[in-house]
Amino acid sequence: MSEYIHKKHNVSVLLYHFVCPAKYRRVVFSEAVDISLKEICVEISKRYDIIFIEIGTDKDHVHFLIQSVPIESPTKIIRTVKSITAKEIFKRHPEVKLKLWGGEFWSKGFYVNTVGKHGDESTIQNYVKSQGKAEEYKKIHSQQLEMF
């Protein structure tokens, strides 16, 4: 769960839901690549003001639930994540590079949405966690429809 981040001049709880597709929507997220991606993200957290609350992979895209500080824009956050993870995945998994041409791992675009601490953080967290599991996806969405 997210926590308040205390800095010298601010306290914040900024949560972002990012979705990043692999280049050409190629199926590149095997179990081994998924594990590596999560390990790389742990290392990113140690060096940057980026906290990964949840990471969910599907075959051709990844959902990130990320907490950061107000000084970092969503674009800068995802640019950092995408550049470091791409380099490291290519290094650790040369077989992935064979599926992609042009030397790029991620598509240029991404989806981002803010997540409210006191609103639907757990819903998004469960959604991200259940990526690639169709039954969980249907269960979560049916619960959301019942709220309306």
Image (cartoon, rainbow, N blue to C red):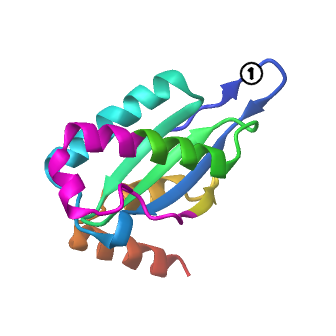
Residue at left offset 37%, top offset 40%: 87
Task: Name the residue at the front extreme.
Answer: 102
Q: How many marks?
A: 1
Residue at left offset 29%, top offset 66%: 60
The reply to whether residue 117 is in sight is no
Q: Position of residue 86 (x, y in %)?
A: 37, 46
Q: Position of residue 100 (x, y in %)?
A: 27, 62
The reply to whether residue 146 is in sight is yes
| Vertical side of 82 occupied by 68: above or below | above
Query: Hey, what amino acid is under mark 1?
Result: Lys
Residue at left offset 53%, top offset 53%: 121
Q: Position of residue 101 (x, y in %)?
A: 30, 63
| Vertical side of 99 occupied by 67: above or below | above
Q: Quadrant of residue 24?
A: bottom left
**What are the residue bounds of the magenta stretch?**
85-111
Q: Is residue 87 magenta?
A: yes
Q: Is residue 128 left or right of residue 2?
A: left
Q: Secondary structure at mark 1?
A: loop
Task: Name the residue at the top extreme.
Answer: 8
Q: Is residue 29 magenta?
A: no
Residue placed under numbered mark 1 in the picture: 7
Residue at left offset 64%, top offset 45%: 76
Q: Quadrant of residue 13?
A: top right
Of 8 and 126, the residue lying toward us: 8
Of 97 and 132, the residue lying toward us: 97
Q: Is residue 33 left or right of residue 109?
A: left
| Vertical side of 55 occupied by 3: above or below | above
